[in-house]
Image (cartoon, grey):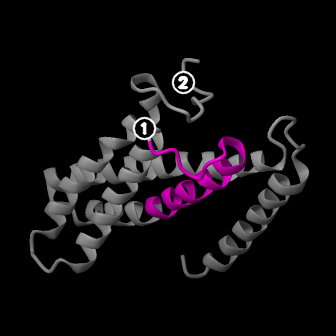
Amino acid sequence: MKRGFPILAIITALLLSFALYEALIGAPTERTMGDVQRIFYYHVPSAWTAFVLFLINFVSSVIYLVRRNIKADVLALVSAEVGVVFCTVVIVTGPIWARPVWGIWWAPGDIRLTTTLVLWLIYISYLVLRRFSTSGQTPVVAAVVAIFGALDVPLVYFSFWFFRTQHPSPVFGGGG
């Protein structure tokens, strides 16, 4: 892996540069929202990536609880760390888009925004627990917190089914 890392880093940098160019320059400007719509090229994939990483964290945490597999615990921790980064991108880019479109940075009554913030806070708590707890039971407690946090992911995604929301419905699997 040490020998392949520089090559993978260069390939990643080139692909990210190409994606940045396409998102900011190559893609046509949306007719009704204008350039602010380009935020979706980061906002939506970051949300999906965070959801996938929290799913990996959930599965790894269950495996750890069942088998006490250290590799599963490490995978759970790493997926939570990266998932929080992507969830942070979602929470930052959402209000940047909302301000010009909705006229406000944050809609307090919007359940999708609130449940996403709760999801982020749960996983921040998970990381704080992992970092600062000195108990021998930390991986077990963290796995339970991760499982609890993963329960919020479907609530975030399907919140528009259960509550009135200002947030746009998903394009795929949204039912309207």
Q: Is residue 161 magenta?
A: no
Percent of width and height locating residue 68: 15, 60
Quadrant of the frame with the C terminus? top right
Q: Quadrant of the N terminus?
A: bottom right
Is residue 98 part of the magenta span, yes or no?
yes
**Alpha carbons under labels 2 and 1: distance apart:** 18 Å
Point out the tag, 2 or 1, that comes first from the N-terminus. 1
Query: Residue 23: x and y, percent?
Result: 80, 53
Residue depicted at x 54% and y 45%: 48
Quick check: 168 left or right of 54?
A: right
The residue identified by callout 2 is: 173
Identify residue for label 1. Answer: 111
Magenta span of residues: 83-108
Which residue of the protein is positioned furthest toward the left in this rendering?
Answer: 136
Q: Dot 1 lies on which element?
A: helix
Q: Compared with residue 154, is residue 88 higher up or lower down, i.e. above or below?
A: below
Decide whether the magenta segment is chiefly helix, strand or loop.
Answer: helix
- Res 30 quadrant in image: top right
Residue name at image x 52 percent, y 59 percent:
86
Q: Nearer the viewer, mark 2 or mark 1?
A: 1
